[in-house]
Amino acid sequence: MLRHLRVTNFAILSDVALDFGPGLNVLSGETGAGKSLVVEAVNLLRGGRASADIPRAGTDEAVVEAIFEVPEDLRERVHARLVEAGLAGADDDGEGTGGELLVRRLIHRGGRSRTYINGALTTATRLGELGELMVDLSGQHQHQGLVDPRRHAGILDELSGQPELGAAMETAWRELRAVEDAIARLTASAGAGGRAERTEVLRFQLEELAGAALREGEDEELGRERSKLASVERLGGGARAAEQLLYGGDGAAVERLDAALRELERLRAIDVALDEPTRSVAEARILVEDAAARLGAYADHVEGDPERLAEIEERLALLARLKRKYGGQLGDVLARMAALEAELAELDGAAGRLEELDAERGAAERAATARAAALTAARRTAADRLVREVGGSLGELGMGAASLTAAIEPAALGPEGADRVELMLRANRGEEAKPLARIASGGELSRIMLALKLALRRADPVATYVFDEVDAGIGGQAAEVVGQKMRQVAAHRQVLCVTHLPTIAALAHHHFMVSKAEAGGRTETSVRRLEATDRRDEIARMMSGAAVTVEARAHAEAMLAAAAVPAPVAKGKAAERPARPTAPVRPASRARGR
């Protein structure tokens, strides 16, 4: 439910903060005071479009922020939406925010807006997907939630009380799709030329690759051998020249080392400190002589092999051609060969496998159709119940000539069954039933929504219902019935209601008064929670106008006494603890009066 709302620089709402409670919350006040602006702010919290002229004159942006307390029976759904939006981890337990959602929208002058959920930047579209679980709004000029036909099948499923039917339908649909996908893959693998032609191509390619007897790393080994054979003369000549410089030629390194060694032998007899250098030179002489011997042997035996070089060149050319045809590297060619073998094996068994898959598809279709039929039957039963309950409520709400119908028509089989469901309303006897979204009268539709929500109060997956002037065009006994009906809904879901009728205001669990005044040459709207005497006086004003009489106050006291029923306790958190942001965002600077 909506626990805390703060609105800053929003039209004539300079800085308003409200703590709503469970049950029925009522906003009252003079016409034009700004009640509907509060409703508009709530609409933005469920992803509604932001108007370009929302920011208060003299400011650059308006801010709407709220804390929602998610009811326990909605937390799994809300968590799933957060995961889809990338705002929560799939391995969380759904309690990552302690059952709270922090929503913040910044609306810049010109219409641009930024949206945050639990501090993370997101889109208004994502907020709308989440907001439809948190708020359902019905007003004089806008209606959401229950008027959307995309929700109607799900509403009947919830009302049926058989969630296992929907789960079984989804499972059957996934199984059917899996079989159909397997058939499509197997059919597509044959290519445009048909299975026989594709098989022939595969066999030709595999014969080519198998005949090449490929070996991982072979091209690198052959490349090194080719380099050696192509450089035989250079290798032999270089090794011989090095051998001469070290040992065989005039002034070779060995001769110079011998001379150095003889001189050091004479000198170390004088100074023993030369023992270590002398030993090092002697070791170097041995190493040089050994290296020279090896170089000489290498030069004697290195020789060319034109035939082997030609074989290598031919083999490398074959490998290069196969790499160009089947892959960039020899390892890629070998991987491609394995893939071709697997495809050929699949095609060789395709005929038999297709027969098996056709049989599996038939069974899956029968199972999915049976699940869809069970779902349709449950929906029809739920629809009958919904029509009866809503019909009774409409009569009590002064709309006895109106009737709700649920159109359940066949549709293509899908994960939600094989129905197209839409709730329709016949406003008067003899008229044609119309979709809810096409009902012209805002007050009329608001009462229809109230009747629907009363019937769905346990099944409709929405935390908070908002009614903007549901009392339009009614009074007397009908107004009292509307208030009682909202109170019944509020026993299960939080209700926010804008009203001008004292009968409805007296039934509220929490009463807020919206008023406006001029300050510093500017209009300011304020909202305050009413208790005791203030609430009595506001209800008296709603009955008698600006001049509140003693009789009106007495009547107001009697109405409040008759309606004195404690508010329901919110599930999950203590109802009396007002929700506050743990780190409130500093509001935009307040514009000074001009």
Image: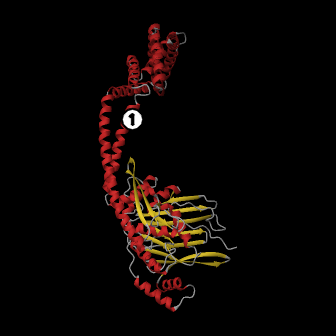
| SS at circle 1 | helix
Q: How many marks?
A: 1
The amino acid type found where label 1 is placed reads: Ala
Give the x, y percent position of residue 289.
Answer: 46, 15
Q: Is residue 296 visible?
A: no
Q: Is residue 159 left or right of residue 264?
A: left
Colour convention: secondary structure
Q: Nearer the viewer, residue 26 or 586?
A: 26
Q: Is residue 162 left or right of residue 80?
A: left
Above or below: residue 426 compared with residue 309: below
Please identify the quarter of the rendering in which residue 149 is found: bottom left
Above or below: residue 411 compared with residue 579: above
Above or below: residue 238 compared with residue 327: above
Give the x, y percent position of residue 108.
Answer: 61, 61
Q: Nearer the viewer, residue 522 or 338?
A: 522
Q: Nearer the viewer, residue 165 or 272?
A: 165
Q: Nearer the viewer, residue 187 or 61?
A: 187
Q: Quadrant of the C terminus?
A: bottom right
Above or below: residue 476 compared with residue 363: below
